[in-house]
Amino acid sequence: MSRIGRNPITLPAGVNAVVNNNEITISGPLGTLKQTFDSVNVEVKDSVITLTRINDENEVKAKHGLYRALIANMVKGVKEGFTKNLQIKGVGYKASKSGNKLVLNLGFSHPIEVVEPEGIKIECPTATDIKISGIDKQKVGQVALNIKDLRPVEPYHGYGVRYENEVVILKQGKAAGKGKK
């Protein structure tokens, strides 16, 4: 059996779950999320969500844990929300907020504008920090990755956009002309 899929999900105060056919709707203080599912049965009783498999095929076993994790992320998202923090490193690299657009100066000949997607909030506490928040974990992570991919971290100086706690291993530069003849 799936060890993750067997774990029940406890609904915190203020969060409601409704199962309708093959769709679960989770609503809480921050918003509402929906997820469709197949190959599993979802039950909501006494503020506890439990998932059971329809059969024991390998694909169904994999989906059992997947849907449990997705529903648990939905519960956490509508109660607390998710955030990703990015840092910008580089000479002249900076970010600013203009209306619902994030304006990035990343060493290109022009500034890059990123429009805030629906359900996602982008903030710039400082010129080199970006905070992305929302209730959908997948969407928050995808927006953060899209911004990060605009200027990947280069391995010699460490310039670029990175996650806040990301460790970047720098390469050693050339050692030409140092003692060799």
Image: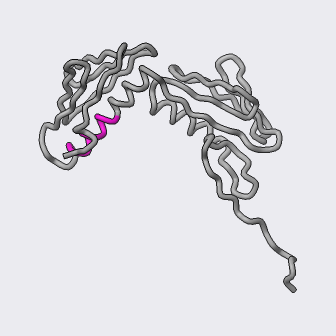
- The magenta-colored residue range is 60-69
* Residue at 68%, 16% in the rendered image: 99
> Main structural element of the magenta stretch: helix, strand or loop?
helix
Residue 66 painted magenta = yes
* In this rendering, position of residue 27 left or right of residue 8: right
Q: Quadrant of residue 109?
A: top right
Furthest residue to the left?
55
* Residue at 25%, 31% in the rendered image: 8
Decide which of 4, 33 is in the foreground and name it: 4
* Residue at 85%, 83% in the rendered image: 180
Decide which of 8, 42 is in the foreground and name it: 8
* Residue at 62%, 51% in the rendered image: 167
* In this rendering, position of residue 58 left or right of residue 30: left
- Count of residue discs: 0
Locate residue 65, reporting x and y percent: 28, 40
Q: Quadrant of residue 44?
A: top left
Q: Quadrant of residue 3?
A: top left
